[in-house]
Image: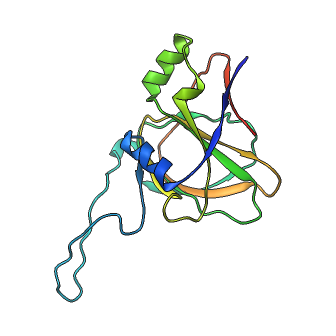
Amino acid sequence: MSDIVLKPVMMTAGIMQELEDRGLIIRLTPSREDYKVKAEPEAVIGKQIYVSEEAYGTHSLLYVSLNNSECFNFGSHPDNEEFLLLGGVAERKMFLIVSLLTRAELAAKIAAETISAEDFVCLEAVFNDPEVSFFVMKKDVPHGECCYGEGLPVTFYVTEGSKLGIDKTDFKGYRLQPEY
């Protein structure tokens, strides 16, 4: 097995904006959209960010609890999902590893044996921060989570279609390994 060692970077507004600029996520931050509400009492305007495909089921909210030190559930989904990183204070730290390539591009690099650490960003997750902790992971963007350090299992929420599955990445002998 060949390790791909990833140097973690702190999840900052700048890093998250770079991921959005690459088309990998959609940030969900306060005052992000400028909804020019008319100066009328009780005016409300909403804007659809995206609509899930019916094939992936009704909307669901998942409670996720992690206690894994290896990123063994790495993969992508055929539709978008939202991360709501609302975490507790006594929990372990979490890395969120995101491929900078689409599912197909990553599979091609694995097959060609040209995959490297430069194909990923390893985010040291930040919880409870309105600038970085809430975002949409776009469809076909491979990603996975793992924990490190001492404490309780990591907890957070994910929303996604009730029938949404995961297309696990076949690394063919490679293993993602955050640098601790």
Residue at horizontal 61 percent and vertical 57 percent from the top: 126
Report which quarter residue 92 is drawn in.
Answer: bottom right
159 or 96: which is nearer to us?
A: 96
Q: Among all residues in the image, which is located at the extreme top?
A: 112
Examine the rendered structure and indicate whether residue 148 appears above or below residue 31: above
Residue at horizontal 56 percent and vertical 19 percent from the top: 115
Residue 43 shows up from this direction: yes
Q: Among all residues in the image, which is located at the extreme right?
A: 150
Q: Position of residue 119 (x, y in %)?
A: 52, 28
Residue at horizontal 55 percent and vertical 32 percent from the top: 120
Q: Position of residue 15 (x, y in %)?
A: 49, 47
Q: Among all residues in the image, which is located at the extreme front?
A: 14
Q: Quadrant of the N terminus?
A: top right
Q: Position of residue 26 (x, y in %)?
A: 39, 50
What kind of colouring is applied to the model shown?
rainbow
In this rendering, would 76 be left or right of 23?
right
In this rendering, would 112 be left or right of 124?
left
Report which quarter residue 95 is drawn in.
Answer: top right
Q: Quadrant of the C terminus?
A: top right
Residue at horizontal 34 percent and vertical 44 percent from the top: 53
